Amino acid sequence: MGTFGKREDSILAGKDEVRSCRLEVRQAEDGHIKGYPIVFNSLSEDLGGFRERILPDAVQLADDLAADFNHDPGCIIGRMRAGTLKASIDSRGVYMDAIPPATSWARDLMASIKRGDIDQGSFGFRVLPGGQQITEENGQQVRTLSKILVRRLSVVSDPAYTKTSIEARNRSAKTPQASGGAPKQTTHIAPLAVYQRRQALLDLELE
């Protein structure tokens, strides 16, 4: 886990990038949502003319990292400062263990995960200065991320990264049935040239 100074924070201020990922769901018993929302060295799906991978040791976790449902700040699944979210980094990726609240929407979410209606997730991040490299592999552009600050984890729809996993662990055998599926989450991806230009400007300002 790491932080960075005020000058870098002001330079990097703005809208975070968001990536979605498919989740592998299975049942268990302790009422937690667990798994790997970020897996290292896994190529994303096509993000509009390029693909993306995250290197091992690339990730810093925000001090107040939170996990939510459908990017809704009113639907927090867990938060590190509250002790309801644990997140750790290992050789595979970023592992999360969230304790969802005893609310109707959280019960509906757990039921939908159990049924298989909701099986995807997402993470929000910022690229830190010098934290990306653009290369070409097999005739396709690949953006490799080596320094990112992860600020939010979410349970959503619309996959971008496919090699991820998560577990929905039920508190009891009797789980209320979900009233409906989650709204489809749309991910807007800028052209690759925008990322290259943005990173060049950030590196210039830090010189």
Image: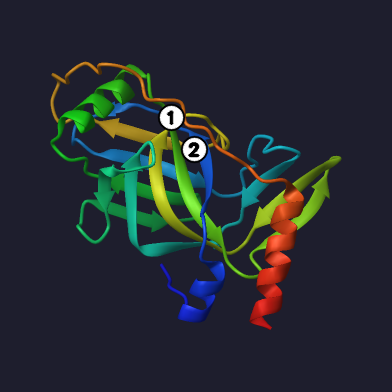
Farthest residue toward the right?
Answer: 139
Look at label 2 and name its amino acid: Thr
The x and y percentages for residue 28 are 25, 30
Q: Quadrant of the C terminus?
A: bottom right
What amino acid does circle 1 point to?
Glu
Label 1: which secondary element = loop
User: Where residue 134 appears, x then y in whole percent?
Assistant: 76, 55
- What residue is drawn where x is 37% and y is 19%? 116
Q: Secondary structure at mark 2?
A: loop
Is the Cβ of the residue at disc 1 closer than 8 Å to that at disc 2?
yes
Closer-to-camera residue (38/46): 46
Residue 122, numbered label? none
Label 1 to label 2: alpha-carbon separation: 7 Å
Indicate left or right for 119 with 14 as reference: left
Check disc 1: other Cα within 10 Å, few if <14, some if 14-19, many if 20+.
some
Q: Is residue 5 visible to the viewer in this orientation of the structure?
A: no
Residue beneath label 1, please?
A: 24
Q: Please tell me which of labels 1 and 2 falls first in the chain.
A: 1
Image coordinates of residue 163 in percent, x first then y, are 54, 36
Q: Is residue 191 left or right of residue 57?
A: right
Q: Residue at image x 55%, y 37%?
A: 187
Q: How many marks?
A: 2
Compared to 33, does 28 lie above or below?
above
Residue 149 x, y percent position in the rendering: 49, 62
Residue corresponding to mark 2: 164
> Between residues 158 and 14, which one lies in front from this camera angle?
14
